[in-house]
């Protein structure tokens, strides 16, 4: 058993040493994945700010938040500016903090009541029945092949899955930072090392 454990740790250490050369890759992949997510969400809110404010404020069909104009502007610009900062890898850790708050609010206020899954399970009898009916209607009255040319019909469940996934990715960036070689943060830290900054 001892020999097996020694062998395991030797192999693990060897892998860890080799992976060290690619430690910049994970933060870069996380950042590039999240950039379009937040850019699209933020710029859409900004483009339709009046309806965004309505949605944030309405208790009937929206979020029912107090000060909807304030929160709509905060959410929209947090997402849009956050996307740009993530793209550049600039102030990465600071940029993730308001985005984490935005995702937590989205998960709790928008998606929580719908459970986990973002897309409903099509093998569920109720969902399968609805999808079957939709297919029949579209085949009879619409251009079904054109509608499904780029993917199958699904029922949006709108659960917390995506918001939770983005939250976890942002949490990883909060810990990892922007990444070596591929972020403005890395080059700023090289230009202005901590020890060379004079303190008041």
Image (cartoon, rainbow, N blue to C red):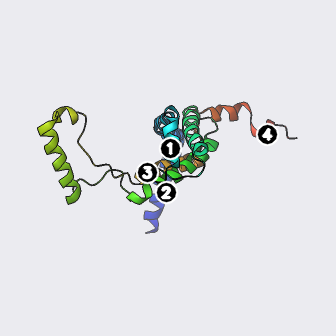
- Residue behind mark 2: 108
| 150 vs 115: above or below | above
Q: Nearer the viewer, mark 4 or mark 1?
A: 1
Q: Is residue 180 left or right of residue 148?
A: right
Callout in the foreground (4, 2): 2
Question: Does residue 106 show up?
Answer: yes
Q: Secondary structure at mark 1?
A: helix
Cα–Cα gap, marks 3 and 4: 54 Å
Q: CA distance from mark 3 to mark 1?
A: 9 Å
Disc 3 designates what residue? 61
Residue named by callout 1:
54
Taking the view exactly as shown, the residue that stands out farthest to the left is 140
Q: Is residue 166 left or right of residue 98?
A: left
| Residue nearest the observer in this picture, 145 or 181 | 145
Looking at the picture, how far across and down is residue 131, in whole percent? 20, 49
Question: What number is the disc on residue 195?
Answer: 4
Are the two marked residues, 3 and 4, in contact with CB atoms closer than 8 angstroms? no
Mark 3–mark 1 CB contact (< 8 Å): no
- For the residues labelled 3 and 2, the Cα–Cα distance comes to 15 Å
Q: Residues within 10 Å of mark 1 (few under 14, many from 20)?
A: some
Query: Which one is earlier in the sequence, the residue at label 3 or at label 1?
Result: 1
């Amino acid at each position: 058993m001892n020999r097996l454990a020694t062998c395991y740790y030797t192999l693990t250490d060897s892998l860890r040493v080799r992976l060290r050369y690619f430690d910049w890759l994970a933060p870069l992949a996380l950042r590039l994945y999240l950039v379009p997510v937040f850019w699209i969400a933020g710029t859409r809110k900004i483009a339709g700010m009046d309806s965004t404010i309505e949605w944030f404020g309405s208790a009937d069909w929206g979020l029912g938040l107090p000060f909807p104009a304030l929160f709509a502007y905060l959410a929209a610009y947090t997402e849009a500016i956050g996307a740009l900062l993530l793209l550049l890898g600039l102030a990465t850790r600071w940029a993730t903090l308001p985005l984490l708050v935005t995702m937590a609010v989205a998960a709790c206020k928008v998606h929580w009541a719908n459970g986990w899954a973002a897309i409903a399970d099509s093998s569920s009898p109720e969902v399968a029945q609805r999808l079957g009916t939709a297919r029949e209607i579209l085949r009879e009255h619409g251009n079904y092949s054109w509608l499904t040319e780029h993917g199958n019909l699904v029922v949006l469940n709108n659960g917390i899955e995506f918001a939770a996934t983005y939250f976890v990715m942002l949490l990883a960036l909060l810990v990892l930072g922007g990444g070596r070689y591929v972020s403005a943060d890395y080059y700023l830290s090289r230009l202005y090392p901590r020890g060379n900054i004079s303190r008041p």
